[in-house]
Amino acid sequence: MKGLIFDLDGVIVDTARFHFLAWSKTAEELGYELTEEKNEELKGVSRIDSLKKILSWAGTTIEDEQFRKMTAEKNEDYLSYVDKMTTDDILPGVYDLIADLKAKGYPIALGSASKNAPRILKKTGMYEMFDAIVDGNSVSKAKPDPEVFLVAAEAIQVAPENCVVFEDSSAGVTAAKRAGMIAIGIGDQQVLGHADFVFPDLKEMSVNFIENLENKAK
Ligand code: BG6
Ligand code: MG
């Protein structure tokens, strides 16, 4: 049986826009305007690596102390949005899909870069849905490194080649492919063309599709 690994931000919940709002504010302080297009390169990327990227785009450097301060402020700002979240913030189709897959007996894991994953899952009532939660607190190498997905596969005791990853970020799809897994991109084909399949959102995904996945992957 396949093991299913879900990314969090932008796949289960629409927090990608909160990250964008919070990073836009940080970028503005550095005299840089963060566009939606450039923001694609921050999706799936750890907090530390995200600020490093913004600094390089802004063509500037800061002291370590300032770096710590900026990531802390960004996170505070981000959490002000997160703390208003409820079950209504689960993306369309996601709760029913995961519940149906769970009922069929599929092992289900979270594979997220976020250190805020448990807080978000609890706020949206999704915490209990997962057999394993692997997040930014449990891994040291950020996507596109495959570590987060390999640790998740081990946690649900499924071989990597039998795992299916649901991802909205380019870095995450690269990580899943490097882990030797089937990658299902959730979002824009232009951004996620390196995934095995791309769906605009999880509304279009069905248990039937997963059941018939054998030999469909590239
Ligand atoms: C990923 C998001 O899921 O988590 C990134 O796509 C974010 O935008 C990363 O930077 C780390 O999240 P957090 O919540 O620990 O800052
Ligand atoms: Mg994501």
Image: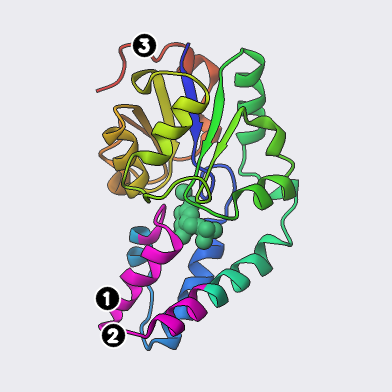
Q: Position of residue 130 (x, y in %)?
A: 63, 31
Give the mark count: 3
N-terminal of the pair, mark 3 or mark 2, is 2
Could you tell me how far apart the alpha carbons at marks 1 and 2 are, in whole angstroms? 6 Å
In the rendered image of this protein, does residue 104 appear above or below residue 7? above
Disc nearest the viewer among 3 and 2: 2
Measured Cα–Cα span from mark 3 to mark 2: 48 Å
At label 1, counting other C-alpha atoms closer than 10 Å, the crowd grade (few under 14, some 14-19, many 20 or more) is few
Residue at x 66%, y 51% (from the top left corner) = 120
9, 112: nearer the viewer: 112
Secondary structure under tag 2 reads: loop
Question: Label 2 is placed on what type of residue?
Answer: Thr
Left or right of 166? Residue 56 is left
Residue shown at the point (54%, 18%) measured from the top left: 207
Q: Residue 183's quadrant in the figure?
A: top left
Query: For the residue labelled by badge 1, is the local secondary structure a helix, a strand or a loop?
Result: helix
Label 3 or label 1, whichever comes before in sequence order: 1
Rendered location of residue 13, percent (x, y): 59, 48
The residue that label 3 is drawn on is 214
Q: How is the image coloured?
A: rainbow
Give the magenta-colored segment's residue range. Answer: 42-71
Q: Find residue 56 and name its label.
A: 1
Q: What kind of residue is marked 1?
A: Ser
Q: Residue at x 27, y 76 (%)?
A: 57
In reply to whether residue 153 is colored magenta, the answer given is no
Name the magenta segment's main secondary structure.
helix
Q: Mark number for residue 60?
A: 2
